[in-house]
Image (cartoon, rainbow, N blue to C red):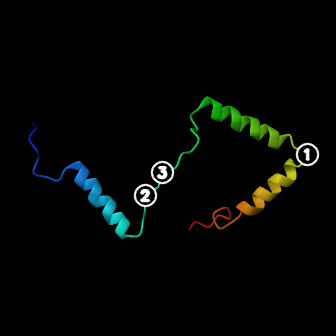
């Protein structure tokens, strides 16, 4: 058997930290997102980008993106 340290174990520290977060009204979640480092992700992003660029509606689509993206940050006002 190993000798236990007098300080809190890592497990107890993590448990106490999670308890404090829950007491603040937070809850843990786990999400899965695409791996942007993957070659297949890059290929699919390129495919979709080219499809949008080649669309007859590309100009209108970009105008829409520009319109919804405008705000204080894009107007040079730092928050």
- According to the picture, the residue beneath numbered tag 2 turns out to be 28
Residue sitting at x 42%, y 65%: 26
In the displayed structure, 15 sits above or below 58; it is below
In the displayed structure, 34 sits above or below 26; it is above
Residue placed furthest toward the bottom: 24
In the displayed structure, 58 sits above or below 48; it is below
- According to the picture, the residue beneath numbered tag 1 turns out to be 56
Mark 3 crowdedness (10 Å alpha carbons): few <14, some 14-19, many ≥20: few
Task: Please tell me whether mark 1 sits on a helix, a strand or a loop.
Answer: loop
The C terminus sits in image quarter: bottom right
Residue placed furthest toward the top: 39
- According to the picture, the residue beneath numbered tag 3 turns out to be 30
In the displayed structure, 3 sits above or below 25; it is above
Cβ–Cβ under 8 Å for marks 2 and 3 = yes
Report, in whole angstroms, how far the alpha carbon at label 2 lies from the one at label 1.
44 Å
Cβ–Cβ under 8 Å for marks 2 and 1 = no
Tell me where residue 46 appears, x and y as whole percent. 72, 35
The N terminus sits in image quarter: top left
Please name whichever residue, 57 or 21, is drawn nearer the observer in this view of the structure: 21
Mark 2 crowdedness (10 Å alpha carbons): few <14, some 14-19, many ≥20: few
């Amino acid at each position: 058997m190993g000798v236990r340290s007098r300080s809190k174990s890592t497990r107890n520290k993590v448990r106490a930290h999670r308890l404090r977060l829950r007491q603040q009204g937070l809850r843990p979640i786990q999400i899965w997102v695409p791996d942007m480092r993957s070659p297949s992700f890059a290929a699919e992003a390129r495919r979709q980008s080219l499809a949008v660029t080649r669309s007859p509606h590309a100009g209108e689509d970009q105008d829409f993106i520009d319109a919804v993206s405008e705000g204080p940050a894009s107007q040079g006002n730092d928050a």
